[in-house]
Amino acid sequence: MSIEWIAADWGTSHLRVWAMQGSHVLDQADSDKGMGSLTRGAFQDALLELIEDWLGAEPVDVVACGMVGARQGWVEAPYSAVPSVPVPRAPIRVPGTDPRFRAFVVPGLKQANPPDVMRGEETQIAGYLAGYKNWDGVICLPGTHTKWVQVSAGEVVSFRTFMTGEMFSLLSGHSVLRHSVGEGWDDAAFAEAAADALSKPEQMAARLFGLRAADLLNGQDASVARARLSGFLIGAELAATRPYWLGQQIAIIGAEGLSDVYGHALKQQGAFFEIADSTNTTLAGLHQARNLTRQTA
């Protein structure tokens, strides 16, 4: 297999890599060796475990995005300030790597007021905009820390981060609600809870304990509790982000199931949106970053 370069999405929990020829995927691999589980000296070995069979005599460029560029990552890639194009400059070179490859990390974006940062999402935004020239609107990137991003004239104008996914994980796994929230899903319960939280976000803390009470008093099904918990949290997020998405063109970029959940909540409010594939946008953005690297080489 003759590859031209390697794309890498290196988050806190996972590492995904793709052997690339131009913009085409030849092979792929992944592991659970994300930034959060590695010391700075362990990044190269974690990468080599996945890509060593792809390497040859000539050095290959590895272009990575995500938390690999954080202060605790392989190399700290400085943030670029918004307003800015998503990837305004060439990725940062990682010094002292194995001679069979050259590693580069895409910088993130920062916002001074209110303070906010992103790493990895800027690459997905760049990849999405590459396929939609002159696109203006709002991009929602749901995940552990969901981003809402205002885009105009090809630039990220502003963005806000919401810890909705992490809150769901903490509440469902480490609070009193862990006794009532289980697996499964109920669309109607989610829709009702999301609409309730969007109209009355100040009631959310009380609504959350109501999930436990409904289990104790009424035997509420654990799948209903799970859907309602998600609905309350996402509904409150949509209430806070209403100035972003109301009346705007919206794109959702994230994992398929979670993107569908956000789409369901937005559809209830009459919002117009499309869902984009997160892997495709990541690869398109990394391809752009690779081109910047070659231009400055």
Image (tube, rainbow, N blue to C red):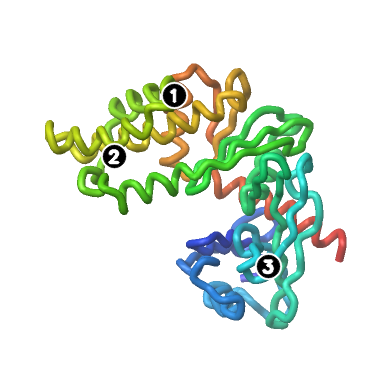
**Vertical arrangement, residue 197 with respect to residue 109, above or below:** above
**Vertical arrangement, residue 50 with respect to residue 179, above or below:** below
Mark 1 Cα shell of 10 Å, populated few (<14), some (14-19), many (≥20): many
Q: Position of residue 84 (x, y in %)?
A: 78, 42
- What distance separates the C-alpha of mark 1 from that of mark 3? 43 Å
The amino acid on which the numbered mark 1 sits, given as a three-letter code, is Leu
- What distance separates the C-alpha of mark 2 from that of mark 3? 40 Å
Residue 285 visible somewhere in the drawing:
yes
The amino acid on which the numbered mark 2 sits, given as a three-letter code, is Arg
Q: Which residue is mark 3?
A: 62
Q: Position of residue 63 (x, y in %)?
A: 69, 63
**Circle 1 sits in a helix, a strand or a loop, which is it?**
helix
Q: Residue at x 67, y 33 (%)?
A: 150
Residue 226 has which mark? 2
Mark 3 Cα shell of 10 Å, populated few (<14), some (14-19), many (≥20): many
Residue 26 visible somewhere in the drawing:
no
- What distance separates the C-alpha of mark 2 from that of mark 1? 18 Å
Q: Which residue is mark 1?
A: 198
